[in-house]
Every structure is written in structure tokens, then in C-alpha cells.
Amino acid sequence: MMISKNIFLKNKTNIIYGISLAFLLIFLKWLELRFIIFNHSYEIYIGLIAIFFTAFGIWLALKLSKPKVETVIVEKEVYIGKPENFIQNTFLISELELSKRELEVLELLAKGYSNQEIAAQLFVSLSTVKAHNQNLFEKLEVKRRIQAVEKAKRLKLIA
Amino acid sequence: MMISKNIFLKNKTNIIYGISLAFLLIFLKWLELRFIIFNHSYEIYIGLIAIFFTAFGIWLALKLSKPKVETVIVEKEVYIGKPENFIQNTFLISELELSKRELEVLELLAKGYSNQEIAAQLFVSLSTVKAHNQNLFEKLEVKRRIQAVEKAKRLKLIA
DNA sequence: TAAATACTCATACTTTAGTATAAAATCACA
DNA sequence: TGTGATTTTATACTAAAGTATGAGTATTTA
């Protein structure tokens, strides 16, 4: 692909150079006719000046022109180390009709606390925690606390 | 950013084209007046040719010069789906002296299976699973299976 | 105000999990 | 061939988890 482009560019260059040259000759001829100048050395002189200043112009342009910046956006995969991008799926939480208290219990379950410990932390009885558990299991359609935690994490209900 | 640059480039081209055209017309008109009415002033004539061809050269150069490509690498954060970049911490596994069987049990624990179910899957007795569990809890320094699973996942012992 | 909902608690029971201890069976390896 | 590590199994027990049922309380909402 690069090669074909180069060839095209070279062809383009040749064409434009040819046209330029033709234009130059026509221009000179036109000048000749226009001003009736028959002095050959003068034509050559003018031609040389034209060529020289054309070259000068080219040099000047290349020297002064700002580089045409072609921004190439390369998507570089940056692997993010920490799963800090936890976004709680509040939609699903309301969809599953999980209450605040149930979510609290769920989070403590995920931390590996026993029912007793959870009851102590929430200042409620063991019975209450068990009740919450049962509701959770039913709503999450699981049978055990581990499954509840696993599913809750998978569904982004808890971190 | 890209759009403004494009506009600038287009403007640049237009400006150069406009100037070139205007300059050419003025030049021709001026030449006509200058040389037909006042007849030959060769220094000026040559100077004008020099200017014209300098401009022509500049135009040619700008037209033909390949864009100098400046590659800008933009690091774009691409969040990779997380379960793909799990790298098991085999070092820690050997460090904790976890046996193959214990790891198997650990993985099944993580999936929320009960001891009975694990025993069935591994074709061993419930006693065996319990024994593995105990060894796991001791090696992982935890008290319950949930804690074991939580810690194992955190330490990248299991996916 | 009545109904719905969430939260709470209790009791009784069954199941599962975890602890402690002991001991075969298997296997790699020196 | 024996030695150590792993794996396996068993028994007996305690602790925790889970089930089922009923009911009181508080808050919100129609």
C-alpha cells in the first residue's frame, strides 16, 4: 500500500512538473510574443532566473512551512490495576427489591462474618439476621450464604 | 482539535491560492502598463519574475511536499474485561503449602457448593472434604469457608 | 385510617459446617 | 525398601447455618 502510494506521488510529481514546465515555456513564449523580445540570451537569462527563484521558493517553502501534523491516535491498551471502578448496580438492587437492611447484612456476609457477629454489629438479634438471610436467599434465588455473596458480587450489588 | 486543524489547513491552501491568483493578475496588469506605456525597465522586470517564480516555487513546494507525519500516541484507557486478567499466584500457593486437592476443594468452595456436593464431585467422602477444609482454614488462617474464599480470591489463589 | 412494607424478635427444628482425633492408603523418592 | 508427605476415611462432638411459623412495631402510602 505504501509503495503504490509512493508511485502515485511520484507520478503526480512528474505530471505537475511537466505541467509546470509547459506553463513556464508557454509563459515565456507568451512574453516573447507579447513584448517582442528576440534576444535569445535574454530568454535564457530570464529562464534561469525563473528556475532559480522557483527553486528558491521551493526551498523557502520547505524551510519555513510548519510540519503538517497528522495526528494518529493509537489506542494503547492500558490495563487498570485496581478494580476501583466499582459501580453499584442500584437498578438491579431496586429490581430485586433488596431493602437497606438486607444490603447491610449482605455486605457483612461478604466479609465473612457469622450470623452472631452480624447481629452484634447491627445491634439486632440472631433471629433478625437469620430472617434477613432468608429473605436475601429467596430474593437472590440461592440456597447458601456463599452463593449469595458470590452472586451479589457478580451482579455488582456489593463491592 | 482535529476539526480546527483541518480548517486551518484548508484556509492555508485557500489563502495561498488566492494570493497567488491575485498576485498573478496584478502582476500581469502591472507588466502591461509598465512595459507598454513606459517601456522596458529590466531590473524591475527581472525582480518581478524573481518574485513570481519564488511564489510559484513556494506554491509548488506546498502542493507537492509530502505531509510530515507527526505521530501522536494518545494513551486511551481501555478497560479490559476483568476475568481475563487473572494470574494465579502460584508462588503464594506453594508458599502456603496448599496441595492440589486442597486447591480443588477451595475452588469448589468458592462456587458455593456444600461439603456434600464437593464430596460428590470429587468422588470422596464427606469426611475427606471436611479434612481438606480444616487444612485450608488453618493454612489460610481463617475460621470459616467464606473467609477462606474471600481471602483466596484476594490473594489471587483462585479466580 | 387502613393497608402495605420493612424491620424486628422468638421458638423449635433440621441440616450443614467445623473441631478433634485417629488411622489407613497412596505415592514420590532417596 | 523405608520414609515423609499427601490423600483418604471414620467417629463423635459442638457450633453455626438454614427452615418454618408466628407475631409485634414502625413508617409510609393510598
Image: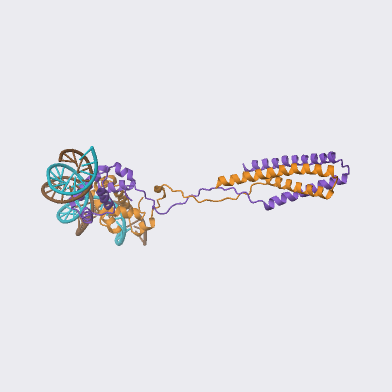
Chain colours: A purple, B orange, C brown, D cyan
Q: Is residue A33 above or below residue C17?
A: above
For residue B94, which quarter of the picture? bottom left
Q: Is residue A82 left or right of residue D29?
A: right
Quarter of the picture holding the N terminus of chain A: top right
Q: Is residue B99 visible?
A: no
State the residue at coordinates (64%, 46%): B12
Task: Depth check: give the residue in front, A101 or D2.
Answer: A101
For residue A111, which quarter of the picture? bottom left
x%, y% of residue C4? Answer: 21, 39
x%, y% of residue B17? Answer: 68, 43
Task: Depth check: give the residue in front, A91 or B111.
Answer: A91
x%, y% of residue B142? Answer: 27, 57
Task: Depth check: give the residue in front, A129 or A81.
Answer: A129
State the residue at coordinates (87%, 44%): A40
Q: Residue furthest right?
A: A39
Q: Is residue B35 left or right of residue A77?
A: right
Q: Is residue A101 left or right of residue A7?
A: left
Task: Depth check: give the residue in front, B22 or A155.
Answer: B22
Q: How many marks?
A: 0
x%, y% of residue B30? Answer: 78, 44
Q: Is residue A34 visible?
A: yes
Q: Residue furthest front?
A: B37
